[in-house]
Each structure stands twice: as structure tokens, then as C-alpha cells.
Image: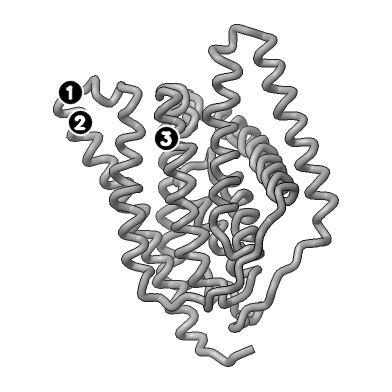
Amino acid sequence: MENYSYIETRKVFSRLGFALTFSILSVNVVQLIVAGFMSAVDPNLLMTDWANFFLIAVSFYLIGFPLAYCMMKKIPTAVSQEKKRLTLRQLVEYGLISYAVMILLNFLTTFLLSFIELFKTESIVNPVQQVILTGSPWLSLLCIVVLSPIIEELLFRKILLDRVRIYGDKVAIIFTAIAFGFYHGNLSQLFYAVGLGIILAYIVLKTNQLKYSIGIHMFVNAMGSLILPMLIGDGSDLLRAQIASVIVVILITFGTILIIKNRKKVELVQGDLTIPESKLMQLVWLNHGVFAYLLFSIALIIMVTVVT
């Protein structure tokens, strides 16, 4: 492995951290400004089914994502690797594993939120669930199923991953997954986003193609925001709700079996630059940029959890 400067490595992660910090900060500031403007024009605008999607489009797609890219683009990327194809079976297996991980970690989140709610007078609002319940299926399809997976994969599994994979698969996967989870800015999505981020980063590192992670991301988002909600409807039809539950249980079961079956087949490649275990915390996490990003994200999560 090549020798390298600890100071340079720390600077790289710090710059990435600051890019994410300013990106997530801009997203939230723009949402507040736009929401305030809409409320001033007509308070009822914020109650429309397209309001949340409009806020996401303006703040993240048009501001937060381009800002993060502009701040990261001058950081060197890893040398392009040979692209590898997944068979249809492999793609389906990764999809089932991703869905199982997401749902199982969502159970953990639900338990944690239920515990927190014991000390609150009101239930904690799940931002995504709120968008799904108040928005139209077509807007959910466009925003949650199509656009968000594409933009998020470009940011976290392309732009960010390309700049940290030189330090090895383990560092790249953990760093991008945690960055992805905290970027959501709420406790409801934190854990399953980290879990999903781990799998999607691994897929991209193994195939060197973004299309697979985008497709799987679209699948899990479609299941949670479109397919199951449409199947369940308003919940008044018990049979439809039971069918949805059976589908989820089957998918989780197959996904869990695949996780157990393939757990020893995971291969992590050493990077051209290896960070010693004793230096990982100092260089990757305790630099100014990443520390600022995590601090802001945690503060945002606490605020959202306490206020909502």
C-alpha cells in the first residue's frame, strides 16, 4: 500500500464533511424560506398534496445536491474500475436483502420511537409517511420512487463513494452509509437508511455500476411509498391489509435467509491507501468537517424528534 499523509487524508474527509454540512444546511434553510413564502401568499398552499414534493424538489434537487457536488468535485476520485454485471438472480437477491434490512431496522426504529413517545404528549411524525399519506400516488411515484433514488445514489454512491473508495471498501461503505443515514435528518429514517446505504455501497463497489443501486433503491422506495399503501388503501378492507402483511413477511423471510446464507461470501477489498485502525477515528470522523456534519445532523434529528 502506498504511503500517504495523515494530514492530507484528514483534509479530504473534512472537505467532504463540510460539503455535506452546507448541503443539508441549505436544504433545511431553503425549505423554511420557501415554506414561509408559500404561507405568506396563501396558508392553504402548504396543505396541498404537492407542497411537500415542491419543497423537496427546490431544496434538495435544485440546491442541496448541486451545492454538495460543487464542493466535492475538486477532490480527487479513485481510478475507474472494470464494470461487472449482475445476473437477474443476483439482482433479485440483493433487492430482497435490501428490503429485509430496511424493514427489520424500521422495526427497531419503531420500538425506539415508541419508547421516546412515552415521555412526550404527542406522537412523533414520520416525515416520509406524512408525505405519502398527504400526497398523490403520482407525486409519490415521481419524487420518492424515481427522482430521489437517482439523486441520492448520484450523491452518495457516486460522487461521495468515488472519493473515499481509495481508502478501502470497509471505510468507503461505512462512511457513505452513515453520511447517507444522517442526511435524512430524522430518527424515523436514520437506522434503515444506514443499513440500506451499506448494501447499496457494497453493490456499487462490487459492480462499479450505479444502475443496480438505483434500481434497488427505487424498488424499496416503491414498496414502502406506493405499492403497499395502494394495496392497503384506507385500511378499512381487512383482507387487503392481511395480503399486504403476508407479502411483507414473505419478502423479509427470503431476505433474511439470503443474509444468513451469503454472510460469509462478503469480500472487502483493501484500498490503495490504508488508514491504520488506530487512526480511523481521528482521520475519518474527528476532523472539523465530518464532526460539524454529524453535530448538525444530530441537532436536527433531536429538534425534529422533540418538536414534532
Residue annotated with mark 2: 38
Look at 81% across and 54% down and name the residue there.
Answer: 262
Helix, strand or loop for disc 1? loop
Quadrant showing the N terminus: bottom right
Q: Position of residue 49 (x, y in %)?
A: 35, 23
Mark 1: give few (<14), some (14-19) or many (20+) Cα within 10 Å. few
Does the residue at mark 1 contact the one at mark 2 (Cβ under 8 Å)?
yes
Q: Is residue 65 left or right of residue 210?
A: left
Determine which of the numbered discs, if any, sits on residue 271 in the image.
Answer: none
Residue annotated with mark 1: 42
Instruction: Return the residue nearer the eye: 226 or 188.
Output: 226
Q: Position of residue 103 (x, y in %)?
A: 66, 37
Considering only vertical position in the picture, is 305 above or below 193? above
Tell me which numbered mark, 2 or 3, is placed earlier along the sequence: 2
Considering only vertical position in the picture, is 124 above or below 156? above
Considering only vertical position in the picture, is 257 above or below 36? below
Distance Cα–Cα, label 2 vs label 3: 22 Å
Helix, strand or loop for disc 3? helix
Distance Cα–Cα, label 1 vs label 2: 6 Å
Residue annotated with mark 3: 142
Look at 28% across and 26% down and name the residue there.
Answer: 46
